[in-house]
Image: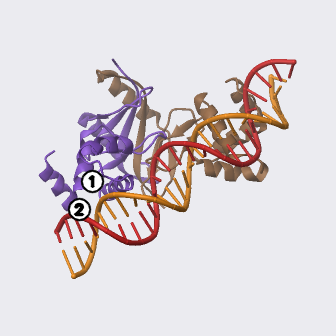
Chain colours: A purple, B brown, C red, D orange
Amino acid sequence: MEKIKIVQRLKEKGLKATSQRIAVLQAVLSLNHPTIEQIITQLKDEYPTIATGTVYKILDAFVENGIIKRVQTDNDHMRFDGIMQLHHHLYGKDSNKIEDYFDDELNNLLNNYFSKKKIPYFDIESIRIHLIGKFKR
Amino acid sequence: MEKIKIVQRLKEKGLKATSQRIAVLQAVLSLNHPTIEQIITQLKDEYPTIATGTVYKILDAFVENGIIKRVQTDNDHMRFDGIMQLHHHLYGKDSNKIEDYFDDELNNLLNNYFSKKKIPYFDIESIRIHLIGKFKR
DNA sequence: ATTGCTGCAAACTCTTTGCAAGTTC
DNA sequence: GAACTTGCAAAGAGTTTGCAGCAAT
């Protein structure tokens, strides 16, 4: 994504477009569900002075403002996802890999299903599928 | 669950049925996706001498042996689930609540769907739905 | 008796916080 | 210039580890 769009994405939410934020958002978008560590590693080349605490603060601000999302994991460290469009995830059982999975047919199927079968005590806002299995080589 | 079945569940996996393990498993089964803290709180009454590190070790052993599962969360602390039967989860958006959701009709629908629509580079072993929304009061 | 488990406390790792100095609008 | 953001370093929280003593089989 070009820098101009990144800046836009920040300003839309009322966040100041500092060079650190731009770099962090670029990193999240270019990496695949990265941990903080991976983000910092990626940044250090072009931005060796960035502070760990700053990266945490930036990512928190992004999540709060709906610019990125946290990825759910069993346990390991925080991971982030810059794709805000509805999608699902493939979780590699042995590898630590998480891949995006887009499937509108599936989304329709599920929306249909849950529009008929209501859960009495719960209002669904979004539906996410976790497909757990193995990536083929 | 009665104590005898708990002991069975441990011995089946080759784990010694210590009183600490029995108490931890009972706690996980009686609580709703508890954190470690909740488990320890529950245990302290009847078992005030149990050590935090021991609880961590016990839970790890349980997960490794398929006696319980970890629950995925955005970020907060480890949570555990003693129900091994296939089921899904409702995540309260504001509350921190996670509830179980059983739905065989849904399971069939999804199994059907994915038996037709293969993902070329991925072998699905299990499908879990996360329904994110709000619990009605 | 053997093997495995617990309790404890110290060590680790990741994450959060506070504040002065620096930037953006 | 006002308001916000960064860097830094220290503190916090949760989790892991090692080992001597203890318990289960």
Q: Is residue A12 visible?
A: no
- Which residue appears at 68% of the width and 45% of the height? B27
Image quadrant containing the C terminus of chain A = top left
Q: Is residue A22 visible?
A: yes
- The chain to which mark 2 is attached is A
User: What kind of element bears circle 1?
Assistant: loop
| Nearer-the-camera pick, B16 or B118 | B16
Q: Is residue D15 left or right of residue A84?
A: right
Disc 2 residue crowd, few under 14, some 14–19, many 20+, Cα 10 Å? few
Looking at marks 1 and 2 on the same chain, the residue that comes earlier in the sequence is marked by 2
- The disc labelled 1 sits on which kind of residue? Ile
Image quadrant containing the N terminus of chain A = top left
User: What kind of element bears circle 2?
Assistant: loop
Looking at the picture, do discs 1 and 2 lie on one chain? yes
Q: Quadrant of residue B56?
A: top right
Where's residue D2, x and y in %?
A: 25, 80
- Which residue appears at 29% of the width and 55% of the height? A66
**On screen, residue B86 above or below B51:** above
| Nearer-the-camera pick, A23 or B121 | A23
Identify the disc placed on residue A13: 2
Identify the disc placed on residue A67: 1
Where's residue B101, x and y in %?
A: 49, 42
- The disc labelled 2 sits on which kind of residue? Lys
Disc 1 residue crowd, few under 14, some 14–19, many 20+, Cα 10 Å? some
Where's residue A43, x and y in %?
A: 28, 45
- The chain to which mark 1 is attached is A
For the residues bearing labels 1 and 2, Cβ distance under 8 angstroms? yes
**On screen, residue B6 above or below A111:** above
Q: Is residue A31 left or right of residue C9?
A: left
